[in-house]
Amino acid sequence: MKLVKTALPGVLIVEPVAFGDERGWFMESFNEPRWRLALAELGEPQPRPFVQDNHSCSRAGVLRGLHYQLPPHAQGKLVRVVKGRAFDVAVDIRRESPHFGTWVGVELTAENKRQLWIPEGFAHGFLALEDDTHFLYKTTDVYAKECEGAIRWDDPEIEIAWPLPAGLAPRLAAKDAAAAVLCEAKLPLR
């Protein structure tokens, strides 16, 4: 596995190694010892162990996010697309961070097999770019409704450049459409 730093410190692209031949391909999608070693080699902090896996399926134009969880159930997420394509986004929501409100976006596809590591203290969202896009992610804490938070996908302070066709609005859950803007959201203290 190869870890690639993004423009947003702490958020990493994970490029697994796939071995292919005329039969197809094989890859190790996650290996705990290699994950920890790769993080250490980059000088990145060691996250808590993964404790929950999630799987969603979305139609083209569905936008999920920007979601996060507050302590004591803050989550780091390792995300990937196993079918279809998605534009995946992480936003730094740590108020004391010099990158507060900064975002980074990466296209994740079944073909490129890339994953994105989003540490605690970041909001996460994605836009499905194809019908039947399957999104898998590991989290470092369990979901806790009382700790969930969301920021508007179109917050003018963040200015995410979602790859939406001109004039088309994304398909949103009611809670995402009603989410607060960054300056009004309840955010983690650290």
Image (spheres, rainbow, N blue to C red):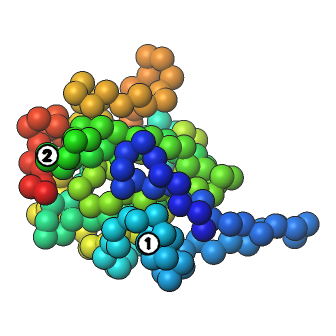
Frontmost of labels 1 and 2 is 1
In the image, what residue type sits under mark 1? Ala
Could you tell me which residue is drawn at 24 percent across and 24 percent down? Answer: 156
- How far across and down, in percent of the image, does residue 136 sit? 48, 63
Quarter in which the N terminus is drawn? bottom right
- How far across and down, in percent of the image, does residue 107 sit? 54, 43
Instruction: Give the residue number, with chain letter if any, for mark 1.
Output: 40
- Furthest-bottom residue in this view: 33
State the SS at label 2: loop
Q: Nearer the viewer, residue 63 or 13?
A: 13
Q: Nearer the viewer, residue 169 or 140?
A: 140
Report if residue 81 is visible in the image. Answer: no
Q: Nearer the viewer, residue 83 or 73?
A: 73
Left or right position of 185 against 136 = left
State the SS at label 1: helix
Could you tell me which residue is drawn at 43 percent across and 59 percent down? Answer: 117
Left or right position of 55 against 178 = right
Could you tell me which residue is drawn at 37 percent across and 45 percent down? Answer: 8
Query: Mark 1 or 2 closer to N-term?
Result: 1
- How far across and down, in percent of the image, does residue 159 sit? 31, 27
Disc 1: CA contacts within 10 A as few (<14), some (14-19) or many (>=20): few
Instruction: Give the residue number, with chain letter if any, for mark 2.
Output: 95
Determine whether label 1 and label 2 are within 8 Å by CB. Answer: no
Whether 76 is drawn above or below 99: the answer is below
In the image, what residue type sits under mark 2? Arg
